[in-house]
Each structure stands twice: as C-alpha cells, then as structure tokens.
C-alpha cells in the first residue's frame, strides 16, 4: 500500500487522478441509465436495450478517434469539444424520451452521445509521461484498473437508483454533470498534461500494428467473459429464487479483481510482460472451467470470486504491453483501443449469453465465458510469439 501512497505524492497526481475518476464515472452510468429510463418511459426493453447498445458501440468506435486527435493536438484542445458533443447529445436524448418524440431521434443521439472520451486512457497517458520506463508505471496502471472497477461498482446502482427513485432521467443527467465537472477539472491541470510530440509524419492508426490488433482482440474476449458472467449470474440468481443475490455475486467479482489489481501492482515480477500475459490467461482459462459446474449461490459466488482475481492483472499487463509497443506520440490511441475492445466484448458477451440462456440453459450460458477464455489464451500465445525476439547465437556452428 505504501507504493500507492508514494504515487499520490507525485506533484499534481492527486488532482488529475480525482478529476479523471469523476470524469470516467459517466461511462458506467449512462448505458444502464438509458436502459432504466426508456424501460420506464417507453415500457420497452427491446427499445431500451437497442439504444443503449448503439451508444456503447458508438463509444467504442469513436473513442479511439478522439484519442488519436488527443495524441496529435493535446488533451486540453480536444477533450472539451468531444465532451461537449456527448453532453449535448445525451441531454437531447433525455428530452426526446421525455416528450415522446420520434424514436429514430433516440438512436441518432445515442450515436453522437458516443463522443464521450476514454478518460481512463487520458489518465494513464499522464502516468506514462511521468513514469515511462520505470517500475512505478505498473503500480500506476494497477491503481487505474482498480479505479475503473470502482466506477463499475458504484456507477450502475447509483444510476438505476436515481432513475427509479427520483425521475427516469435522473441517472443519465447526473452522469452528464459528472462528465462536465470531471473533464473541466482535468483539462485545467496543465502541469501534468503530456506534451504534444513532434509529428513530422502523419502516422497511420496504431490498430494496424499486429500487437495492438491482438491485444484489442484479447481484451474483446476478456470483455465477453465479463459480460457473460454479468448476465448468467443474474439469470442463475433468478432461477434460485434469489434475484437480489445477483448484485452480491457481481460484487464478489469486482472486489476480487480490485484486490488482485492492488496486489499485482505492488509486486515486481522478473518475467517479460508477454510471458506474464500467457500465465495470466492460463489462470483466466482454468478459473473459468468451474463456472459450468455451480449449483447454488454460494458456489457461484466462490467461483466468480476466483475468476475475478485474474481480470485486473491481465488488463494491467495488456496496458503495459501497449506502452512498450506503440510510438510515444500515439500512446493514448493505443490505450483506448484496448478499453474499446473491452467495452465491445462486454456488450457482445451479455448479448451472446442472453441468447444462449434463452435457447438452452444457464449452464450452457456460462460456456460462453469458457470458450472466450480459450481465445484469450490463444491471443496471448500469438502476442508472445511476435514480441519475443529469437536469440541468434554468435557461433556459426550452432546456428547452422
């Protein structure tokens, strides 16, 4: 824990960490808030889910482009404009829902609402500028992974509670307030903003780099595991006539991931990042197997706690690999592709698990997570293969 306290003693760090935390909470609040709001006002879960899914997909596609612009022009020049578009769009979506205007407008503003920037990547970019090439960077990434988890522990229940307890638009409305305050406070802190690197040549997107593609795919499959566990756990709890226990089960997953992230960030391992990634994905794969054998809420909570233990370390290693693999002047874009991959994966996992559970059963639904874990491991192997350079012996006899 001392290493984390030391991090926060870095000049300016407390300010951008707190502002970044406020600014990233809307990501966890908005989609679930849209679902709750529209299910209340329109009485249609199909419409609510469709609009929320389009918003999530839009965020995943647009966020890397925003980050690409940030790498070229700077955080303080790009983030206010992108956030303003998202802010106005979500407010317009709320107005359309309130006045029962044509449904197509909901989908239009869901798309433009996706201009919400990836604040997780922006904060990590500041940490990278401070600790590039130093062991403290792993600890900083671990702290950010824990804060990401914290947002998804706090954000959704607050958003749903406000929509149900106050008025249907309350959750997304508070999310936009957080976005405005958080981004404003963040960009005003100029001293820790990464400087714009000289770009004599306009680089193509980093997604064209093989390692970035593979890491984004790895995060997508990791997200499928999370989305599957979310939906299947809710379905399992309902089948056990204990629907309220689903929140407890998912809390175990988040708490486990937070604890593992803090622990991983405080330890130094004498292994290459690509080798650690393979080990972490093997553990992810093995811990996914018991999901298909759970029989009650206690067993599910135990298994989910175990599965969650390997989420944050895998994400931290992947972020560290991006920092090693992309040009300095494209770091924010590289980090954002991973976060977008994770977001798309969560949405896909939820949709796939829901379909499989409806068509077959809950145990088969958990199989989606197990299959995704196999692909996570396969991606890690490919990443290891392309990042580990072969050792060439100087003795021609041994080489020939």
Image: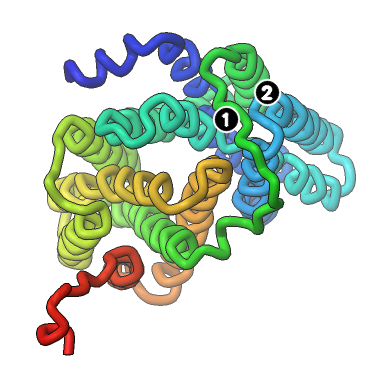
Q: What element carries label 1?
A: helix
Q: State left or right for residue 57 relative to residue 343.
A: right
Q: Residues within 10 Å of mark 2 (few under 14, many from 20)?
A: some
Residue at 16% from the left image edge and 49% from the top image edge: 306
Q: Closer to the observer: label 1 or label 2?
A: 2
Residue at 50% from the left image edge and 55% from the top image edge: 341
- Label 1, on which residue? 26
Residue at 25% from the left image edge and 33% from the top image edge: 135
Q: Is residue 218 above or below residue 29?
A: below
Q: Is mark 2 on a helix, strand or loop?
A: helix
Give the camera-side residue of 159 and 164. 159
Residue 162: percent from the left, percent from the top? 56, 23
Q: State left or right for residue 124 relative to residue 110.
A: left
- Of label 1 and label 2, which has the lower sequence position? 1
Q: Residues within 10 Å of mark 1 (few under 14, many from 20)?
A: many
Give the camera-side residue of 37 and 332. 332
Quadrant of residue 101 within the rendered picture: top right
Q: Is residue 2 above or below residue 211?
A: above
The C terminus lies in quadrant = bottom left
The label shown at residue 76 is 2
Residue at 42% from the left image edge and 27% from the top image edge: 127
Residue lying farthest to the right in this orientation: 102
Residue 363: percent from the left, percent from the top? 27, 68
User: What's the colour scheme?
Assistant: rainbow
Quadrant of residue 78 within the rendered picture: top right
């Amino acid at each position: 824990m001392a290493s984390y306290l030391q991090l926060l003693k870095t000049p300016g760090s407390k300010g951008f960490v707190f502002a970044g935390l406020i600014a990233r909470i809307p990501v966890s609040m908005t989609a679930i808030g849209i679902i709750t709001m529209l299910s209340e006002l329109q009485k249609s879960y199909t419409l609510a889910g469709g609009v929320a899914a389009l918003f999530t997909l839009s965020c995943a596609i647009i966020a890397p482009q925003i980050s690409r612009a940030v790498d070229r022009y700077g955080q303080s020049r790009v983030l206010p404009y992108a956030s303003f578009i998202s802010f106005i769009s979500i407010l317009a979506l709320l107005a359309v829902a309130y006045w029962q205007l044509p449904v197509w407008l909901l989908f239009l503003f869901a798309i433009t609402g996706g201009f919400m920037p990836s604040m997780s990547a922006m904060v990590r970019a500041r940490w990278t500028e401070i600790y590039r090439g130093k062991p403290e960077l792993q600890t900083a990434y671990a702290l950010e992974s824990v804060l990401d988890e914290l947002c998804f522990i706090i954000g959704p229940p607050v958003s749903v509670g406000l929509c149900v307890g106050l008025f249907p638009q309350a959750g997304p409305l508070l999310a936009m307030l957080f976005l405005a305050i958080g981004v404003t406070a963040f960009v005003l802190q100029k001293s820790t903003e990464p400087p714009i690197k000289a770009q004599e040549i306009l680089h193509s997107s980093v997604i064209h780099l093989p390692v970035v593609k593979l890491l984004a795919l790895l995060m997508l499959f990791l997200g499928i595991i999370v989305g599957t566990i979310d939906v299947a756990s809710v379905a399992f709890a309902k089948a056990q006539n204990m629907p309220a226990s689903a929140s407890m089960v998912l809390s175990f997953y988040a708490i486990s991931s937070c604890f593992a992230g803090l622990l991983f960030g405080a330890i130094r391992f004498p292994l290459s990042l690509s080798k650690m990634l393979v080990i972490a994905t093997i553990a992810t794969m093995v811990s996914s197997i018991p999901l298909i054998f759970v029989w009650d809420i206690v067993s599910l909570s135990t298994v989910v706690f175990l599965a969650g233990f390997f989420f944050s370390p895998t994400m931290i290693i992947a972020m560290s690999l991006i920092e090693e693999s992309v040009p300095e002047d494209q770091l924010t874009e590289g980090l954002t592709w991973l976060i977008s991959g994770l977001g798309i994966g969560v949405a896909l996992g939820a949709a796939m698990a829901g379909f499989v559970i409806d068509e077959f059963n809950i145990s088969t639904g958990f199989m989606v997570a197990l299959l995704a874990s196999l692909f996570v491991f396969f991606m890690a192997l490919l990443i290891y293969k392309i990042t580990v350079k072969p050792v060439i012996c100087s003795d021609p006899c041994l080489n020939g």
